[in-house]
Image: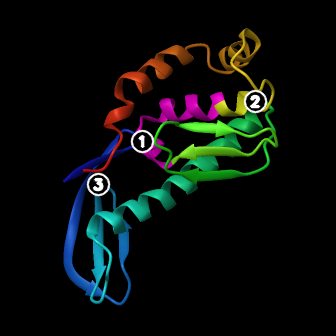
Amino acid sequence: MQVSIQSKTFQVIISPKRFTKDRVVLGLNTITIFQAEDSKKHIKTIFTDWLKEYARKIISERTKELSRVHGFEYKKISIREQSTRWGSCSSEKNLNFNWKLILAPPLVLDYVIIHELSHTIEMNHSRAFWKVVENVMPNYNEYRNWLKTNGNLLKID
């Protein structure tokens, strides 16, 4: 099986070796999944759990960087598996992101982050909101359309 993470393709390898704990190892071009001897988890669950944690790291770092560069302020980030949303922003400026965004190209992830950060200024989808998004990412529509067209492909089979 192969998986694309941030536009980089990895070969997913299920190792026959067993350890005391489930683990996933990220290599240059491979992701190796090790299942513990007494594991009750399915391989797909082990991999998905790892992807969620990896997404938390990447999305948190990228959000911090984009907010610093563009002068946004937010309180905290949560990574979830939302069935109908890629992200959201609460009135308290808490940001939520779907972990599956890690499977999207980097600029698509940036678009969703910028979209949610823009809600820290405009809590709606008014013209003023879209102007904030456009000021940061003038070609945002390209990535918005990519997500509309390809978002259903962001999954692990």
Is label 3 in a helix, a strand or a loop?
loop
Q: Position of residue 142 (x, y in %)?
A: 47, 16
Q: Which residue is mark 2?
A: 70
Q: Which residue is mark 3?
A: 29
- The amino acid type found where label 2 is placed reads His
Q: Residue at x 52, y 37 (%)?
A: 86
Q: Position of residue 124 (x, y in %)?
A: 73, 22
Ranked by sequence position, the earlier of labels 1 and 2 is: 1
Where residue 150 sits, quadrant-wise, is: top left
Q: Residue at x 74, y 40 (%)?
A: 90
- The amino acid type found where label 3 is placed reads Asn
Q: Which of the two residues, 144 or 13, is positioned nearer the viewer here?
A: 144
| Magenta-tinted stretch | 99-115
- The amino acid type found where label 1 is placed reads Gln
Q: Nearer the viewer, mark 3 or mark 2?
A: 2
Q: Is residue 114 magenta?
A: yes
Crowdedness near tag 2: few (<14), some (14–19) or many (≥20) residues, C-alpha within 10 Å: few
Q: Which residue is mark 1?
A: 6
Asked whether disc 1 touches disc 3, contact meaning CB atoms under 8 Å apart, the reply is no
